[in-house]
Amino acid sequence: MDGSSAWGAEDEAIIATNTEATECKRCAVELGYWKDDYIGYFAKRVDRKAPEINRGYYARVRAMEMFIHQFLEGVVLQRCGTKCQIINLGCGFDTLYWRLKDSTQAISNFIELDLPAVTSRKCHIIKRNKQLLQKICKEDGEVMTRAGELHADGYHLLGVDLRCAGAVRRALAAAGAADELPTLLLAECVLVYLRPAAADALLAALAGSFARCVLLVYEQCNLADRFGAVMRSALGARGVPAPVAAHSPAEQAARLRALGFDAARAWDMDAVWRALPEEDRARVERLEMLDERELLLQLNQHYALSVATRGALFADLDLNA
Ligand SMILES: C[S@@+](CC[C@H](N)C(=O)[O-])C[C@H]1O[C@@H](n2cnc3c(N)ncnc32)[C@H](O)[C@@H]1O
């Protein structure tokens, strides 16, 4: 596929998944599940979501953060002698850049990629809000925006179709991605919207490019069973192509190793939830009543977090670290 692939209803439905994710995150933040001073810029007023949805989003954000911090601590503690870079694939309206900017100096370059329709909206929101813009650009710094892209020293937001290997390569080069830097690759609920062959090609190319990297993938799993079939048809009803990748966590880890990562592990979100510190789970349990415990369990068993690494530096990343 080239960079000018036809735009269709399927793409519109995929883009809408970002709106939904952002609204769900905003709702959970408003209810006190976690703190995010920036999400409000990207989703205005939102309806209250069901407790099991809020809990699911909490586990997702908390699990990603847990591994992101392990990666950053690794970079700092192991004294790589260099800072690191983060590449956020299908970033949507993720606020991670701003949240990390408040807490770490270890990142030299943060690159965000999504479809142009999403990055141009994100770009517009950033430009309109001083609180977002000033974290990207110091007073004397420069921000360059054009056609839904934003470039500043240490932050790059680019519109690109992840299904086009050549376009991704060019976008990363334009954003100053450096092959030799310790690199964190994020794919939070993204790869499942690509056809498996395109997702595999993307991951193999990334594994081949970055010799010292960690990849975090959060997405649906176990979609071959009955509950998975319900999830697939719910996605289909909204016009999103039903994910073909119905891997179990173990299959997902094996897939990542086969694509060129040295090591990979994956857990369903029930395992992740149980591995969270007791006090975190107790705090969240108190936020709102949860009647649908069985539904939450089933949801958690159909989402997984995978961690794949290249290079020895990050080989010890773990759920219980
Ligand atoms: C469910 S949202 C997740 C957004 C963000 N990662 C998060 O977790 O909040 C999926 C994102 O993947 C993006 N996406 C899906 N297919 C894509 C593609 N082929 N190229 C670039 N981005 C894509 C969508 O536009 C959307 O922003």
Image (tube, grey):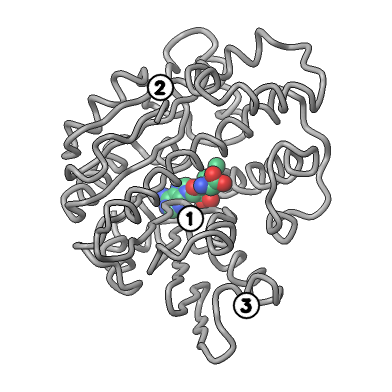
- 113 left or right of 62? left
Residue depicted at x 52% and y 81%: 145
**Label 2 residue SS:** strand
- 223 left or right of 17? left
| Cα gap from disc 1 to disc 2, whole angstroms | 34 Å
Residue depicted at x 73% and y 54%: 43
Question: N-terminal of the two: label 1 or label 2?
Answer: 1
Question: Within 10 angstroms of label 1, few (less than 14), some, or many (20 or more) residues?
Answer: few
- 206 left or right of 18? left
Question: Within 10 angstroms of label 3, few (less than 14), some, or many (20 or more) residues?
Answer: few
Evaluate if marks 1 and 3 touch, with contact meaning CB atoms under 8 Å apart.
Answer: no
Amino acid type at circle 1 is Trp
Quadrant in the rendering for residue 101: bottom right
Residue depicted at x 35% and y 51%: 184
Q: Position of residue 167 (x, y in %)?
A: 30, 63
Question: N-terminal of the two: label 1 or label 3?
Answer: 1
Quadrant in the rendering for residue 255: top left
Question: N-terminal of the two: label 3 or label 2?
Answer: 3
Residue depicted at x 27% and y 58%: 79
Residue at which label 3 appears = 134
| Cα gap from disc 3 to disc 2, whole angstroms | 37 Å
Residue at which label 1 appears = 7
Using the image, determine if residue 36 lies above or below residue 148.
Answer: above
Residue at which label 2 appears = 267
Q: Position of residue 214 (x, y in %)?
A: 30, 45
**Label 1 residue SS:** loop
Indicate which disc residue 108 carries.
Answer: none
Amino acid type at circle 2 is Trp
Q: Position of residue 48 (x, y in %)?
A: 82, 35
Evaluate if marks 3 and 2 touch, with contact meaning CB atoms under 8 Å apart.
Answer: no
